[in-house]
Image: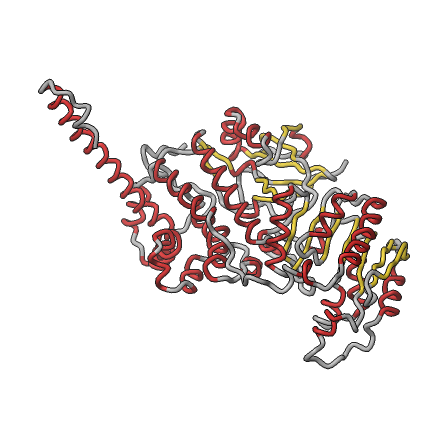
Amino acid sequence: MIFFAGTAPAQAYLDPGTGSLVLQAAIGVVAGGLVALRIYWGKIKSFFKRKNSRDGRDNRFTDRK
Amino acid sequence: MERAVPENASYRDPAGRVYLLGDRVLRSVTRAGAADYEFLRDGGLLDELASDGRLIGCTEVEPSLLGEAPEVRYVLEHPRLSFVSYPYEWCFSALKAAALLHLDLSLESLERGATLSDASAYNVQFQGARPIFIDVLSFRRYRDGEYWFAHRQFLEQFLNPLLLTALRGVPFNVWLRGRLEGIPSDDLRALLPWWRMLDWRVSAHVILPARFQRSAAKIGDDRVARIKARSLPKSAFRSMLASLRRWIEGLEPSLPRQSAWSDYAETNGYRALEAESKANFLRRFAAKVKPRCLWDVGCNAGHYAEIALEAGAKEVIGFDADHGALEKAFARASKGGLRLLPLYLDAADPSPGQGWRGIERKALGDRRNADGLLALAVVHHLAIGRNLPLKDVVDWLIGLAPQGVIEFVEKDDPCVRQMLQFRYDIFPDYGRENFRAAVLARAEIIEEQEITANRRLLVWYNRRDD
């Protein structure tokens, strides 16, 4: 058996076509970037949330954007 | 004992192949495909999709049916399809329905940890206007982060042909027949005006893959390694499928608004009474013969096919060369849930045997399954429109099914006069007596009737076995 930890196995019985794979690798990078951004954004939001709740303010309104 | 014969169209996938054993359709699952098959079977996905009619059913049978075959782990039996059609015979809406089915199955399997290993349009068949997926071994376990390996095949077999018709107004049929692999992105790209690039979907699924493919020859080993090391997150895979689905769902064929024959049923000069006597003749025929499968050559928008179905035919395969008429017939079948499948056919040039060794896809003549024929107002199109000898046309038609109805249109009929308006009349043999003689050369005439004032003739024949 072959183990590809976290990578995409190139074992299709079809020839996937290099053009399509280059495209998907690019989509993968962009999607990965978006995921990273979202995580980052989440961190930023939660940082401010914590700060707000530490101030003891009602944050129901400040959160609504 | 009867031996199982491998089906010629099924040899590419190492996971298994299809065999015919008499009337039975069997599929082997080899060692290479067994683990994926078990995963899918035990997860219940195959059963669920089969029960709502989108996937062909299968039951495990005794492996010894295939004889001595050490690499075979399972043998499955499928119900036999009455007729196999090919994507180059489908109308736009049929290919679109097949594409949507493929994407739906991909999206739903992904939620269940499975994916489709290929995207061949030949894996879809039709029962009436309803598409059904026939390759159970296309399903396999999804590995997290894997690429969509069948993306290119999906583009060539589904998206590019649909775009050719939707964006450029060119019917895809002869192109798909000319290249069984489908339409390459590079070919389609060359046909699109530059401003189509502004549509990001065209850029993403046509222009970029074509461009990357062209530069692929120069790609270095390090680049290959980088691509292999990367992955496509599941969410990105899902959104690729979903955005293709949304796009394709909105595509419509850009065909001339009024094709020559799509309005034929309404404008051909029949008076209501005459159309009704034609319908009654067909009703008598269909009620008496009760064809299991009726071939309607020159089916137009499917009006008479529907009458035949109501009167007793179980299933109709319709054929026409007019794309507008086929769209109407497909819509009629789809809306009414009719067992009518309209297919593209140029009767003077029917689908040949082709593909690997010339037998991978069968010629239309080798897929004959009709026990009834309708050929209404087609003889003159072939005999006069295409210069085919009258008796050969009749002989070909009668060869399609043992019983049927053929309509003969006289030379002084407005339709034929129009066909001859700029031509020399080189058809001295074209006439009713020669038509009847050609029918009688191969068949008995059960009933005949003149149905219009300009003497259109319907003949109900019964072929002699010889």
Query: Quick check: B312 left or right of B219?
Result: right
Point out residue B420 in the picture as x, y percentages from the top left corner. 72, 76
Query: In which quadrant will I find the N terminus of chain B?
Result: top right
* Residue at 67% from the left image edge and 30% from the top image edge: B64
Residue at 81 percent across and 43 percent down: it is: B290
Question: In the current view of this chain or complex, which residue is farthest to the front?
Answer: B272
**Quadrant position of the C terminus of chain B in the picture:** bottom right
Q: Is residue B449 left or right of residue B157?
A: right
Please tell me in which quadrant of the rendered image residue B381 appears: bottom right
> x and y percent of residue B253 in the render?
51, 56
Residue at x-position 68% and y-position 52%: B302
Here the colouring is secondary structure
Q: Quadrant of residue B375?
A: bottom right
Which residue is at the far left? A55
**Which residue is pictured at 40% across the width and 44% down the height?**
B243
Quarter of image, res A36? top left
Residue B402 seen in render: no
Q: Position of residue A20 (x, y in %)?
A: 38, 50
Foreground: B55 or B343? B343
Q: Is residue B417 above or below residue B137?
A: below
